[in-house]
């Protein structure tokens, strides 16, 4: 099962929803309005809804009569509330969208929260997605990849700690047993040639797949 969380970022950065016809959707704050405008009925919505007007909030309440409105001052971000709600469904994959535009602190918060949940729920795949990028975390081990024409470039960054023993096969620029320290840009904008693999001996890797447009 795919669960897609839609936050209130710029509409132009959202991915094409048609790629996920069987997904369940959860609205995060004003992202709920985006779903309703696209005639997608969300399974649930979470947030304090401080970014929507009273009129729009009533539209959301009409679509989701059992909606619970959280206080503005709380210990969890709206994105974390959405991830918490998503895990009630025991999904195979959770996709975060609408979090990469606008305020950078919101984006960083979403990225760190996604990392936390990927650690807590290793059987679930977590992705951060917009119209040009797909981001996910890779744990130690070997990960098989297949070239996706939608994402030409593949970049690798350490997250939380340095990466040890990075090996890339099937890439334009192969790598064998390399360390990836913080601050390096050596491992960005690689290209997968067909089928390939990423092997990590230690650390946690942030993999970003991107297109120019």
Image (spheres, grey):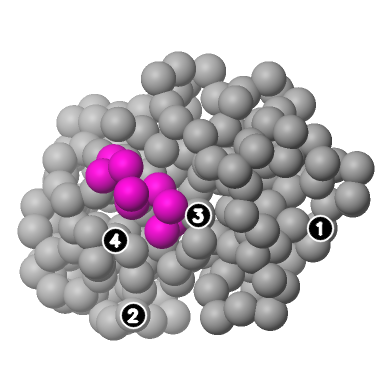
Q: Are marks 4 and 3 in contact (CB under 8 Å)?
A: no
| Residue drawn 45% across the image and 17% down it | 21
In the image, which residues are magenta? Answer: 83-91
Q: Is residue 211 above or below residue 159?
A: above
Q: Determine crowd level at label 3: few under 14, some 14-19, many 20+ residues with C-alpha closer than 10 A.
A: many
Residue 29 at x, y = what percent?
Answer: 68, 52
Q: Which mark is residue 160?
A: 2
* Image-based side of 76 in relation to 139, left or right: right
Residue 24 in view (yes/no): yes
**What secondary structure is marked by label 1?**
loop
Q: Quadrant of the N terminus?
A: top left
User: In this rendering, which labeled residue sits more in front, label 4 or label 2?
Assistant: 4
| Residue drawn 62% across the image and 23% down it | 40
Q: Is residue 99 magenta?
A: no
Residue 211 at x, y = what percent?
Answer: 53, 38
Q: Which mark is residue 118?
A: 4
**What secondary structure is marked by label 3?**
helix
Q: Determine crowd level at label 2: few under 14, some 14-19, many 20+ residues with C-alpha closer than 10 A.
A: few
**What secondary structure is marked by label 2?**
loop
N-term-proximal mark, 1 vs 2: 1
N-term-proximal mark, 3 vs 2: 3
- Our reading of the magenta stretch's main secondary structure is helix
Q: Nearer the viewer, residue 15 or 123?
A: 123
Residue behind mark 1 = 51
Q: Quadrant of the C terminus?
A: top right
Q: Is residue 196 above or below residue 198?
A: above
**What secondary structure is marked by label 4?**
helix
N-term-proximal mark, 3 vs 1: 1
């Amino acid at each position: 099962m795919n669960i897609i969380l839609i936050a209130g970022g710029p509409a132009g950065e959202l991915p094409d929803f048609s790629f996920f016809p069987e997904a369940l959707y959860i609205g995060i704050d004003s992202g709920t309005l985006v779903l309703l405008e696209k005639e997608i009925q969300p399974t649930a919505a979470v947030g304090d809804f401080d970014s929507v007007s009273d009129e729009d909030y009533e539209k959301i309440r009409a679509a989701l009569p059992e909606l619970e409105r959280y206080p503005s001052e709380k210990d969890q971000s709206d994105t974390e509330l959405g991830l918490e709600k998503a895990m009630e469904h025991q999904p195979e994959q959770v996709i975060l969208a609408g979090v990469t535009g606008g305020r950078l602190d919101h984006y960083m918060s979403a990225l760190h929260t996604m990392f936390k949940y990927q650690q807590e729920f290793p059987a679930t795949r977590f992705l951060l997605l917009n119209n040009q990028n797909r981001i996910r975390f890779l744990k130690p081990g070997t990960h098989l990849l297949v070239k996706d024409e939608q994402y030409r470039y593949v970049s690798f960054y350490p997250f939380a700690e340095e990466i040890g023993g990075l090996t890339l096969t099937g890439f334009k620029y192969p790598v064998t047993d390399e360390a990836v320290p913080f601050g390096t840009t050596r491992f960005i904008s690689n290209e997968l040639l067909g089928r390939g693999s990423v092997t990590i001996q230690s650390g946690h890797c942030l993999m970003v797949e991107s297109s120019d447009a």
